[in-house]
């Protein structure tokens, strides 16, 4: 059975259950470089829309089991 690409889970920066999605290839590459790791497949990205006018998303990172994997939040940039 394949791992789902989206799920609802708790986001500690939004303060509630929000929609999360898997990272795309560019985001994975950015996070690998940022963390100095060879794999980042366990991370999920919060896609909660914070500003409906601009479409700005939360973009907080979490793992499937840990809602707060970093002391300070790491938010993925929008990579074109």
Image (tube, rainbow, N blue to C red):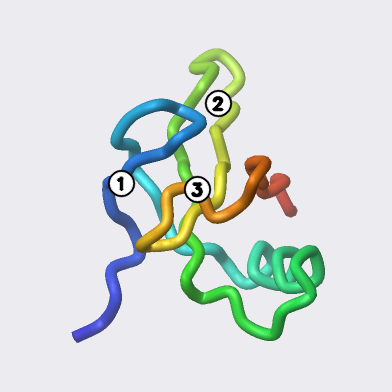
Q: In the image as oriented, which residue stretches furthest toward the left? A: 1
**Residue 65 occupies quadrant:** bottom left
Q: Residue at x 42, y 57 (%)?
A: 66
Between 19 and 61, the one lying in front of the other is 61
Count of picture labels: 3
In the picture of the structure, the residue carrying the numbered disc 1 is 9
Relative placement, left or right, of 11 versus 40 is left
How far across and down, in percent of the image, does residue 45 sit? 50, 51
- Label 3 sits on residue: 68
Q: Which of 72 and 76 is in front in this view?
A: 72
**Of the pair 40 and 51, the residue shown nearer to us:** 40
In the image: residue 21, left or right of residue 79: left
Q: Real-space Cα distance between discs 3 and 1? A: 12 Å
Residue in the image at 54% along x and 55% along y: 69
Point out residue 31 in the picture as x, y percentages from the top left corner: 70, 65
Q: Position of residue 28 (x, y in %)?
A: 64, 69
- In this rendering, is residue 2 above or below 59? below
Spatial CA span between label 2 and label 3: 24 Å
Q: Are marks 3 and 1 in contact (CB under 8 Å)?
A: no
Question: Is 40 left, or right, of 5 in this rendering?
Answer: right
Separation of disc 1 and disc 2 at Cα?
20 Å
Q: Could you say which disc has been placed on residue 55 in the image?
A: 2
């Amino acid at each position: 059975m394949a791992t789902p690409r989206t799920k609802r889970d708790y986001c500690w920066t939004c303060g509630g259950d929000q929609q999360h999605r898997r990272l795309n290839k560019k985001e994975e590459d950015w996070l690998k470089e940022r963390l100095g790791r060879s794999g980042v497949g366990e991370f999920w990205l919060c896609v909660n829309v914070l500003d409906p006018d601009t479409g700005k998303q939360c973009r907080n990172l979490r793992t499937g089991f840990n809602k707060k994997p970093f002391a300070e939040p790491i938010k993925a940039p929008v990579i074109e």
